Amino acid sequence: MLAGMTIYYCPVDGTRSAITALTWCCPVCRGPWDLDFTPARGIGMNALSARIDSLWRYKDFLPLDSSAISLGEGRTPLIPLTDTVSAKLDYLMPTLSFKDRGAVMLAELARRLGPDRVVADSTGNAGTSVAAYSARAGLPCTVYVPEGTSPKKTEQIRAHGARLVTVPGGREATALAARAAADEPGVFYASHVFNPYFLHGTKTYVYELWEDLGGRLPDALAVPVGNGTLLLGAALAVAELEALGLIETRPRLIAVQAEAVSPLATAFHAGADDLPPAEDGTPAAATLAEGIAIPRPPRARQILAAVQASGGTFLTVPEDRIREAQRDLAARGFYVETTGVACWAAVREGGEAVSGSVVVPLCGAGLKSGMAG
């Protein structure tokens, strides 16, 4: 059932579309959709204790209230790293990354709509997750990845039965190839960037923190940002919890980028509300944090606005600190891929920006890419 799943709407020009139309972006501006959705009121923490131990315990706050293809995603542990910094172990997900939170929402929506096939694009983790949940839903799936994507990630995508298309060039070329396929009839574009159902999945990260911390949130949430899906999901959850009267204060959002690919950090510290126009012919820089190496995120304006509104900031980390953070976490018992250690690299030395209690996500398992050389 899609009851209560009203419509997509464009936050730029107000264009609206039925969810059943398979229209993956605003036909006017070609930008990402948002979702016209309001969570149910009157649900407190006491109502959650007897519910299923997965993210579907928060069904009252989600645009889909159940999933026939759940793999038990969500409810990952929260473990202290220091007296003030805790880590949420989102690499302990069915496909070993936080992307399962959003991918299960996309695949469940696709299952209900019944497209001919599912298409996704990714640097690896989102594609792996969409491939797994599409397999669970019995839907043919094609995943586009950039050349140079970790062999372990492409192996996992193939293992789930998806067709893998390797695209010459970087992340932008891969996205363009997938979007061309998404324009074909009968295709559901399982985009973790353009489809807002993904953001409503990632917001469960914060609902879990709220529950685990006894009805409050930490002073700050540090989040790695490429396309910004976890950050925007977190901002969405914080706004909902406040509107529902379930929290009194909002945490600061600390957005973390690799120094080598940090377009949003540069724009934020310049006081801009969007990215500058693209410069043709500029090669994409390389970084160990491949999952956040996004030169032009489609939701850039929303990301910048969310961090600004929270009173937060952007931090960047150089490659040597990413290596050091991965080794440090491994020495503490956490084997995390290089993208997933970015937030720990940013906050481990403290500083005014990370004062108070902070939670960092460990987003992907080290098995995804191995240790940095």
Image (tube, grey):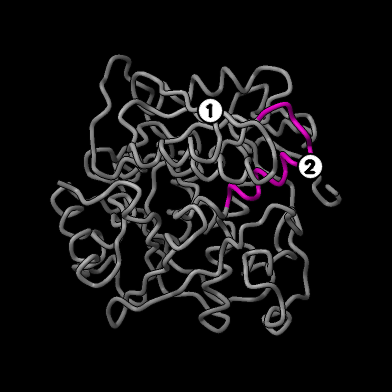
Q: Which residue is mark 2?
A: 112
Query: Magenta segment range?
Result: 102-117
- Residue 179: give x, y in percent of width and height: 56, 22
Work out whether 108 lies above or below 162: below
- Cβ–Cβ below 8 Å for labels 1 and 2? no
Side of 206 where 22 appears, left or right: right
- Residue 36: give x, y in percent of width and height: 74, 47
Q: Amino acid at mark 1?
A: Arg
Q: Nearer the viewer's eye, disc 1 or disc 2?
A: 1
Q: Quadrant of residue 340?
A: bottom left
Work out whether 263 lies above or below 136: above
Crowding around mark 2 (Cα neighbors within 10 Å: few <14, some 14 to 19, many 20+) is some
Q: Secondary structure at mark 2?
A: helix
Predominant SS along the magenta part: helix
What residue sits 58% from the left and 61% below the top? 73
- Residue 77: give x, y in percent of width and height: 46, 73
Q: Earlier in the sequence, mark 1 or mark 2?
A: 2
Q: Amino acid at mark 2?
A: Arg
Crowding around mark 1 (Cα neighbors within 10 Å: few <14, some 14 to 19, many 20+) is some
Work out whether 37 lies above or below 193: below
What residue sits 41% from the left and 74% below the top? 219
What residue sits 70% from the left and 39% below the top? 138
Q: Which residue is mark 1?
A: 163
Q: Secondary structure at mark 1?
A: strand
